[in-house]
Each structure stands twice: as C-alpha cells, then as structure tokens.
Image: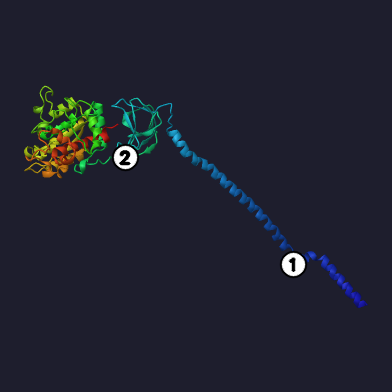
C-alpha cells in the first residue's frame, strides 16, 4: 500500500513538474515544435498573392492608358499636315490662266505627252491641289469640276503655293516616232519648251516657222505644195493637225509652208546665211544677216535648218561647225527652237564628217535633230536625182506630187523631205507648242 502511494506521489510530482516547468521545456524544445511551423507558412502565402494581384492589375491598366494617349498623336499627324499645308477653297481661286496664245490645255498627267482633258480660256480661275517636285506642273480643279495638270508658267498665282503638296512627278520627254520607219527624229526635250517660252516673252509667233538653207530648201518641191493645200497624206492623216496649226497665220508672203524665206537661197553655204552682204535689200536692215532679218520680220517659234550640201565642197569642216553653231546660237538667243537637219549624200563628197558635226551640235545644245540623211538611205540611189546633188522627185512639173505621200511617191527624196519635215513639225507642235 505504501508502495502504491509512493508511486502515485511520484506521478503527481512529475505532472506538477511538467505543468510548472513547461516554459523551460518550451524554450528548450522550440526548434522542434511541430505546431507553429505549419501555422506560419499557411498565413504567408496568402499575403504575396494579394500583393501580386494588385501589381498585375495596375500594370496592364497603366499600359493601355499610355498607348491610348500616344495613338491619337500619331493619327493626328497625317490629318493635320494637309490641312495646314494647303486647303483649296472653291470660292477662292488659287490661280488663273494667263493671257498667252489661245489658252491652256489641261492634261491627264504632268507632261506634254499626256492626253488633253480640257482646254481653258485665258482668265479661267482654278483651284490647285498638288504639284510636281520640280514645280513645273500643277494639279488643278477647273470651275467645271475636272481634275488635271497644267504647265505652271501659264498660270497667274493668286495665293502662296509654296506649301502645295507634291502629288506627282513630271513625265519623261517622249520618244518621237520616225516617219515611215525611214526617218529619225530625236531631241524634242523639255529644253525646247524653255526656248519656246523665252521666245513667247520676246514676241515670237507660236504657229509660225522659218526655213533656213540652200536650194534643197527653196526648191518649189519643198513644203510649198503643202502650203497651197495640194497634198495627199495617205496613211499619215495624223499630220493634218500640224498642217492646220502652221497654215493659219501669214509668215510674210504666205503661211509658213508657202512663204519665201529671207534666210535661204540657191547655192548658199553657212557663210552666206551669216553674211550681211546677202541680206534682202529693201527688207533687211543695214548690217543685218539674212538669218537675223528672217527672224526679225517673221518672228517664228521654230526654224527648220538644212544647210551643208554646198559647204562640203566649199567650206572647211571646222568653219562649217563654227558657222552652224553660230546659226543655232542666234536662234536660241531669240527664243526660236532650231531644228537642225543632217544633209543627204552628195556625189563625189564625204558628208559623214559634216553630219557628225550636225549631230554633235544638236546634242550639245539639247535641240531637235532631224536625221534626213538616214531617211534617204533606204531610197533608190539614196534618194538623189541624176545630178547627184539634189533629192529626186516624182514629177518635174507637177510639184504637188512631192507632197503626195502614197504609193511609189514615197521612193523619192523630196517626198521624204516633206514627209519628215511634217513629222518634225508635228512632234514640236504636240510636245512643245501645245499649252
């Protein structure tokens, strides 16, 4: 019994010791207590997701806000530029057509080779909506609502067009087709237009041309039948417009085709054209050369220059080259487009160096080249008559046959001279003289 009581006392003491000394025991065994550790990680994970969810929510809300702010700025730029640059007002014209010639042609594209959309009378008021990079052509709206391109030199600007946007580029100079696949016409470039415009300011007449040369020019076979209306275009009906254009005005004694030139005569060389001693008395002024006299009296916009057949026999090549350049320069100084022609063969002489000089002068001055020599090469006897000097002709007495561009007539030198001359005039009219 005593032993049992003793055992119970020991158990009570142990229990009291445990209850009273739990703090000591807790300090001693804290690192290995199992209960607190699961409680702490259970709370900590619940807080980070909350913070992350806030950050995740804020981040996307800020990103679209910034993007939305910038997007309108980028959108406003193209909208703002044309508005600030140029805004044509239908009730307030930006330009009007100058009082030059017969008016102004509106073209489908910025170039003389483009098709004509409309013809505008002088004084017509226009709204401008664009221009080419070089400032030569302007895109306009006509009073009737048509849109097209016009050459800027024929406009009187009524407002500042420096801010007009560039909406196109000028077309390249056109390639001019050769007549009957036997001639060669080249060099009808924008420079010819500049020459023409200068001539208009000097008072030259748009629809008049002059003839400069020797017997190959003054012969009745050459161009006169066209001026008389005694011609047959055959399959070359497209040349009718050029004939009409240059036939409407009297040059001096007749229209340009039928006029007797003051700067052409039988047997002449380049020396004679530049010699005041050969000027026509009673018409030309003292000290005036035949060329200067012709230009002053006739006031042409174009000069057809074929000279050299007599030079090959009488004038050294270097002098011929110098004289021809002087003829060209006098033309340019007066705003006249010089169309220089190669010369046909001449029996017993080498014309190649002279034609090379003609070609170089045409290219170096950027003026039209009329390669009559090439057109003659496909003809019987290279287009020469039995005398070996002058072109051949269908009839010695019926001059109209030299302007009959049908059938076997196309095998004669004077016929091809007239045909290629018309092709040259047609090209210059279409690509240079048309407003």
Which mark is nearer the camera, 2 or 1?
A: 2
Q: Residue furthest right?
A: 1
Who's the residue at 80% across and 65% down the image? 22
Q: Nearer the viewer, residue 410 or 122?
A: 410
Who's the residue at 27% across and 37% down the image? 190
- Mark 1 and mark 2 in contact (Cβ < 8 Å)? no
Who's the residue at 8% across and 27% down the image? 277
- 45 lies above or below 326: below
**Label placed on residue 29:** 1
Question: Under tag 1, what secondary structure?
Answer: helix
State the image coordinates of residue 241 (x, y, percent, origin top left).
Answer: 25, 33
The answer to which image quadrant residue 6 occupies is bottom right
Number of other residues with Cα within 10 Å of mark 1, as a class: few under 14, some 14 to 19, many 20 or more: few
- 355 lies above or below 19: above
**Residue 119 in view of the camera:** yes
Q: From the image, tell me which residue sits under label 2.
A: 171
Q: Is tag 2's residue or tag 1's residue first in the polypeptide sequence?
A: 1
**Residue 151 in view of the camera:** no
On the rendered image, what quadrant is the C terminus found in? top left
The answer to which image quadrant residue 188 occupies is top left
Q: Nearer the viewer, residue 229 or 303?
A: 229
State the image coordinates of residue 2 (x, y, percent, origin top left).
Answer: 92, 77
State the image coordinates of residue 154 (x, y, percent, origin top left).
Answer: 31, 29
Q: CA distance from mark 2 to mark 1?
A: 99 Å
């Amino acid at each position: 019994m005593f032993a049992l009581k003793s055992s119970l006392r020991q158990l009570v003491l142990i229990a009291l010791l445990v209850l009273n000394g739990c703090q000591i025991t807790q300090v001693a065994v804290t690192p290995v207590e199992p209960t607190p550790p699961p409680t702490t990680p259970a709370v900590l994970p619940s807080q980070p997701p909350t913070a992350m969810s806030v950050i995740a929510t804020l981040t996307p809300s800020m990103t679209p806000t910034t993007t939305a702010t910038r997007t309108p700025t980028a959108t406003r730029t193209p909208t703002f530029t044309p508005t600030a640059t140029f805004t044509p007002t239908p009730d307030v014209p930006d330009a009007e057509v100058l009082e030059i010639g017969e008016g102004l042609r509106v073209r489908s594209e910025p170039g003389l080779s483009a098709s004509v959309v409309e013809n505008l009378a002088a004084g017509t008021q226009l709204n401008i909506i664009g221009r080419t990079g070089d400032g030569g052509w302007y895109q306009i709206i006509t009073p009737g609502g048509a849109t097209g391109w016009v050459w800027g030199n024929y406009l009187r600007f009524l407002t500042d067009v420096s801010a007009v946007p560039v909406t196109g580029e000028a077309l390249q100079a056109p390639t001019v087709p050769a007549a009957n696949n036997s001639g060669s016409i080249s060099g009808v470039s924008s420079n010819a237009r500049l020459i023409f415009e200068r001539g208009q300011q000097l008072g030259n007449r748009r629809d008049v041309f002059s003839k400069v040369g020797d017997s190959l020019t003054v012969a009745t076979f050459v161009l006169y039948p066209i001026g008389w209306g005694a011609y047959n275009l055959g399959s070359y009906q497209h040349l009718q417009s050029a004939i009409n254009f240059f036939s409407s005005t009297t040059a001096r004694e007749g229209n340009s085709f039928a006029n007797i030139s003051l700067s052409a005569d039988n047997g002449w060389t380049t020396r004679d054209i530049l010699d005041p001693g050969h000027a026509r008395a009673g018409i030309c002024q003292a000290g005036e050369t035949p060329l200067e006299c012709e230009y002053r009296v006739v006031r042409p916009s174009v000069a057809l220059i074929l000279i050299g057949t007599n030079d090959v026999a009488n004038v050294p090549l270097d002098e011929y080259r110098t004289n021809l350049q002087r003829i060209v320069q006098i033309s340019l100084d007066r705003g006249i487009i010089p169309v220089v022609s190669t010369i046909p063969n001449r029996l017993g002489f080498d014309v190649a160096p002279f034609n090379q000089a003609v070609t170089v002068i045409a290219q170096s001055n950027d003026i039209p080249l009329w390669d009559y020599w090439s057109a003659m090469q496909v003809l019987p006897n290279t287009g020469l008559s039995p005398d070996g000097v002058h072109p051949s002709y269908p009839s010695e007495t019926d001059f109209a046959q030299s302007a009959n561009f049908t059938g076997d007539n196309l095998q004669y030198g004077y016929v091809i001279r007239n045909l290629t001359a018309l092709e040259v005039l047609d090209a210059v009219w279409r690509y240079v003289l048309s407003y």
